[in-house]
Image (cartoon, grey):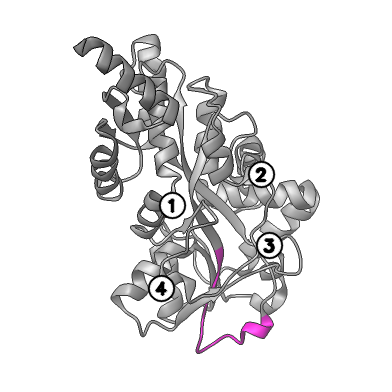
Amino acid sequence: MKAAFRFAVVLLGLLAGAPALAAPGEVVVYSSRNEHLIKPLFERFTADTGIKVRYVTDKEGPLMQRLRAEGANTPADVLLTVDAGNLWAASEMGLLQATDSEVLENNVPAHLRDPENRWFGLSVRARTIVYNREKVDPAALSGYAALAEPEWRGRLCLRTSKKVYNQSLVAMLLAEHGEARTEEIVRGWVRNLAAPPFASDNEVLSAIAAGQCDVGIVNTYYLGRMLRATPELPVTVFWPDQDGSGVHVNVSGAGVTKHAPNPELGRRLIEWLSSAEAQEMFAGLNLEYPANPEVPADPLIAAWGEFKPNVINVSNAGRLQARAVMLMDRSGYR
Ligand code: FE
């Protein structure tokens, strides 16, 4: 009698699609996203679903090596990392499996996920032009390519070409302009540098604030964090190529691992992370833009206004990355 009742409850739960009645379990995540950005989310997910989350954080390289070495014995269900280039590399290495999910197809726009559904963008990172408000009239700015023009000689600051963010940016330029034009642009940037490339986006921003250079290219969340601490900083955002292809965007995202012990729980976690409730927190904690277009951005970054993103599929960043690295190398971009 009792068993029959329980069976009926479970059946009703299944019919209603009520996740609370499904057997809770544990999902294991390998994450290159910092602990302080994921822990509060995982706690909320557990509170919502009863599913526990165990996680390991490290840089993406070691995490991918570890997944490869563990093979079929991996405890990991989900890989969470930044940059489409890394997500693409993980899928090329055979570390991820396709996840068919209507929820994810609805919540994540097509250009922000793998065309074969092996990974899904969960936050959008805009890599845009920033400038010193006291030294630059924004009317003089137009797009990434124009920063190669002679008027910016000795006024540009860039981060090193070793960083995957710039490799992805140049890969996107390659997809749009082809080899010869992209090389012209990158050579022009190098000619215009006010200082040797910096190690971080924060150093680029500090150099612009200090007047060492006038313009640069950074991910907006670095500026957001700096402005949160120092609101009077004379640096702000310019949205390039708004009459053309739009702002270069990248993602942080996740996919279910090839040998996940619990691929269903992995799918449920990624679906939950794409939901309105989680997206505000996922993006907001790091001042990124939500991938789910239904969710508003944090007011601090919403104040920079709306922008048109480049909607070329972000997986191009991975596909063209090796060519981008060679191009930057022969153009003298260190
Ligand atoms: Fe970053």
- Earlier in the chain: of badge 1 and badge 3, it is 3
Query: Circle 4: is it few (<14), some (14-19), or many (20+) Cα within 10 Å?
Result: few
Q: Is-magenta flag for residue 138?
A: yes
Residue 313 badge = 2
Question: From what the image shows, is residue 132 above or below residue 123?
Answer: below
Query: Circle 2: is it few (<14), some (14-19), or many (20+) Cα within 10 Å?
Result: some
Q: Nearer the viewer, residue 315 or 107?
A: 107
Write the residue at 48% across / 21% down.
95
Q: Amino acid at mark 3?
A: Gly
Residue 246 badge = 3
Label 2 to label 1: alpha-carbon separation: 23 Å
> Which residue is disc 4 drawn over?
300
Residue 276 badge = 1
Q: Which label lies toward us, 2 or 1?
A: 1
Region in magenta: 128-140
- Tell me whether circle 3 and circle 2 mark residues in contact (CB < 8 Å): no
Is residue 145 found left or right of 107 in the rendered image? right
Q: Secondary structure at mark 4?
A: helix
